Image (cartoon, helix red, strand yellow):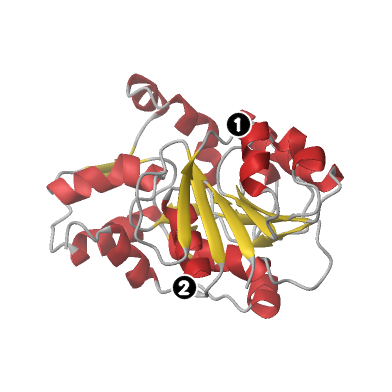
């Protein structure tokens, strides 16, 4: 069995730790607010992911480190020498001008601040003297997931109120299940091919309007109306980052995850399973 460290105790980090622990590995789950856990073979250590020296101490001897939090990437070559790195990323780095479906070998050409940060983080990982793989996902669905859908649309659906969202409500969009992200991270740790590359998490497709309707139907709610927020409305709500990233919802967003399916053996869960898990506390 191996020794793994999972950095970040959000929905993906915890699920990754759970999968590894159930396989019998020795797992450390660490974050600033890691809390308690009853996961088999998983120990929790409270630490700040930006404290590279402390993170280095925790990770000493690890076979692989799963970066599910924003950590001090520039310290990897010295602090994590000898360990493999599996990095949780997203699609922001491809930028607004990338053709859909997005392929994992596309060059990064960010057009947003968030995308630029992600691209720099990955470029530093590739230049480091450690084997690294980045797992890139689209917008999350799943229990406890934080996404534009969960923040903007879901509360109104639960309350049976008119629903507003961003972008083109009828544009097909890729949605990624947090549990599928964790399964992809774990599978990537076993990848025997060349590292220094990315994989896309297999996802399911639905327009925001379709997702709103499917979610409401599972809750036995009636959707009295759906519309798209205007830019001034988004600004008035204080969601300035949503304006920068709204391009992701203004046209179809498709993700090619065929290599993940073929090389890592991971396939997307059904959209129904994703929605049900998102609504776990409501059903």
Residue 24 is marked as none
- Element type at mark 1: loop
Q: Which quarter shows the C terminus?
A: bottom left
- Element type at mark 2: helix
Q: Which quarter shows the N terminus?
A: bottom right
- Which residue is pictured at 47% across the width and 73% down the height? 22
Report whether residue 96 is seen: no
- Of 246 and 129, which appears nearest the observer? 129
Q: Is residue 151 left or right of residue 122?
A: left
Find residue 53 and report its horizontal and vertical position in percent. Answer: 67, 33
Identify the image quadrant of residue 196.
bottom right
Find residue 277 and report its horizontal and vertical position in percent. Answer: 31, 64
Find residue 184 and report its horizontal and vertical position in percent. Answer: 58, 66
Above or below residue 100? Residue 121 is above
Q: CA distance from mark 1 to mark 2?
A: 28 Å
Above or below residue 95? Residue 218 is below
Residue behind mark 1? 50
Mark 1 is surrounded, within 10 Å at the Cα level, by few (under 14), some (14 to 19) or many (20 or more) other residues, namely some
- Which residue is pictured at 38% across the width and 50% down the height? 145
Identify the image quadrant of residue 279.
bottom left
Mark 2 is surrounded, within 10 Å at the Cα level, by few (under 14), some (14 to 19) or many (20 or more) other residues, namely some
> Residues at badges 1 and 2 in contact (C-beta under 8 Å)?
no
Report whether residue 158 is seen: yes
Find residue 77 and report its horizontal and vertical position in percent. Answer: 82, 41
Closer to the chain start, of discs 1 and 2, is 2
Residue behind mark 2? 22
- Which residue is pictured at 86% across the width and 43% down the height? 127
Count of number-bearing discs: 2
- Which residue is pictured at 64% across the width and 68% down the height? 2
């Amino acid at each position: 069995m191996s020794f793994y460290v999972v950095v970040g105790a959000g929905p993906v980090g915890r699920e990754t730790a759970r999968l590894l622990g159930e396989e019998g590995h020795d797992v450390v789950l660490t974050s600033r607010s890691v809390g308690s856990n009853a996961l088999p073979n998983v120990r929790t250590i409270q630490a700040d992911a930006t404290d590279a020296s402390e993170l280095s101490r925790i990770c000493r001897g690890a076979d692989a480190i799963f970066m599910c939090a924003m950590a001090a990437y520039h310290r990897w070559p010295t602090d994590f020498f000898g360990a493999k790195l599996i990095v949780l990323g997203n699609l922001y780095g491809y930028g607004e001008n990338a053709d859909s479906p997005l392929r994992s070998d596309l060059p990064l050409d960010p057009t947003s601040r968030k995308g630029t940060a992600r691209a720099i983080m990955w470029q530093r990982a590739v230049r480091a003297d450690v084997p690294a793989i980045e797992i890139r996902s689209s917008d999350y669905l799943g229990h406890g997931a934080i996404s534009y859908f969960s923040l903007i649309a879901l509360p109104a659906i639960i309350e049976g109120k008119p629903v507003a969202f961003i972008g083109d409500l009828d544009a097909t969009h890729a949605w990624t299940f947090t549990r599928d992200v964790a399964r992809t991270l774990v599978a990537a740790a076993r990848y025997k091919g060349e590292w220094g590359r990315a994989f896309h998490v297999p996802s399911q497709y639905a327009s925001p309007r379709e997702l709103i309707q499917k979610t409401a139907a599972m809750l036995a709610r009636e959707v009295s109306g759906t519309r798209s927020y205007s830019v001034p409305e988004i600004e008035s709500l204080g969601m300035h980052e949503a304006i920068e990233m709204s391009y992701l919802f203004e046209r179809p967003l498709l993700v090619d995850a065929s290599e993940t399916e073929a090389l890592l053996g991971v396939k997307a869960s059904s959209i129904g399973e994703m929605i049900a898990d998102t609504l776990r506390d409501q059903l």
